[in-house]
Image: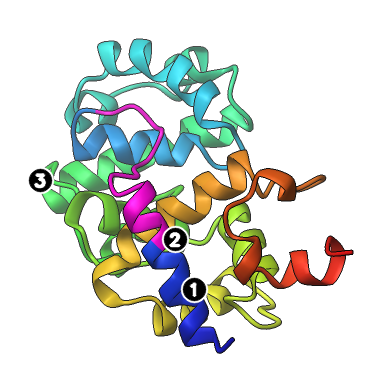
Amino acid sequence: MTKKEKIQHIVSYFSENNPDAQTELQYTNPYELLVAVILSAQCTDKRVNMVTPKLFLRFPEAESLSHASVEEVFSLIRSVSYPNNKAKHLVGMAKILVEDFKGVVPSDIADLQRMPGVGRKTANVIASVVYNMPTMAVDTHVFRVSARIGLTAKAKSPLDAEKQLVKIIPKAKIAIAHHWLILHGRYICIARKPKCETCPLTAYCDYFKKNKQT
């Protein structure tokens, strides 16, 4: 099976079985999503969703967050990973968002990465989720799943994996494919012990063929 045939089968499966895949982070506008994605770095979406309601109640938009003290933001997000750095990032992000973009979350990847706490992965998430742009955010789940299935070949970094994925996934499906791969990695193709016995993609998976078939 060629890689092109493999991606066709996988896209077809997910398009039929999970056509509305989306982020599990809870948000109501682009500002809230940006905050949530910054908080989600090396932290679970579940934990972030426990923290953000009070944070958004106190700072409902970038303007109010831009005037916040790092200490107050820290007190509201202290249960997430790396709360000190993230509190600083959130306040710094809000200042730039207000001063340079008039509070409107930009769609340009380079503009997004000007803000503290916003790396390429976060920028790609915002561009794809908010603006439906064909950008592929590669987190640990996407990196692992794409390598195991065989969608990427010897990718040495998230950027390398991103470049490979956007070449083979149909442009119209790139934004949602990000969610397909994340959810598949979160619930089936988990890191320590993938649930191959319940995985619907074993017929197309290099890992299964190499490690699980008898």
Q: In the rendered image, which quarter contains the C terminus? A: bottom right
The location of residue 64, given as percent across then percent down, is 21, 23
At a point 64% along the width and 75% down the height, the residue shown is 150
Q: Position of residue 177 (x, y in %)?
A: 39, 60
Q: Is residue 25 magenta?
A: yes
Specify whether residue 106 is in view: no
Q: Does dot 1 land on a helix, a strand or a loop?
A: helix
Tag 2 near tag 1, CB within 8 Å: yes
Q: Farthest residue in the right direction?
A: 214
Image check: 184 left or right of 105? right
The outermost residue toward the front is 214
Point out the tag, 3 or 2, that comes first from the N-terminus. 3
Name the residue located 64 percent from the left edge and 44 percent from the top edge.
188
Please tell me which residue lies in front, 34 or 130: 130
Frontmost of labels 3 and 2 is 2
35 shown above or below 182: above
Marker disc for residue 162: 1
What is the spatial separation of the Cα atoms under label 3 and label 2, in whole angstroms? Answer: 25 Å
**How many numbered callouts?**
3
Q: Which residues are magenta?
A: 13-27
Q: Amino acid at mark 3?
A: Lys
The answer to whether residue 165 is magenta is no
Whether residue 125 is visible, yes or no, is yes
Amino acid on which the number 1 mark rests in the picture: Glu
Name the residue tied to disc 3: 102
Residue at mark 2: 137
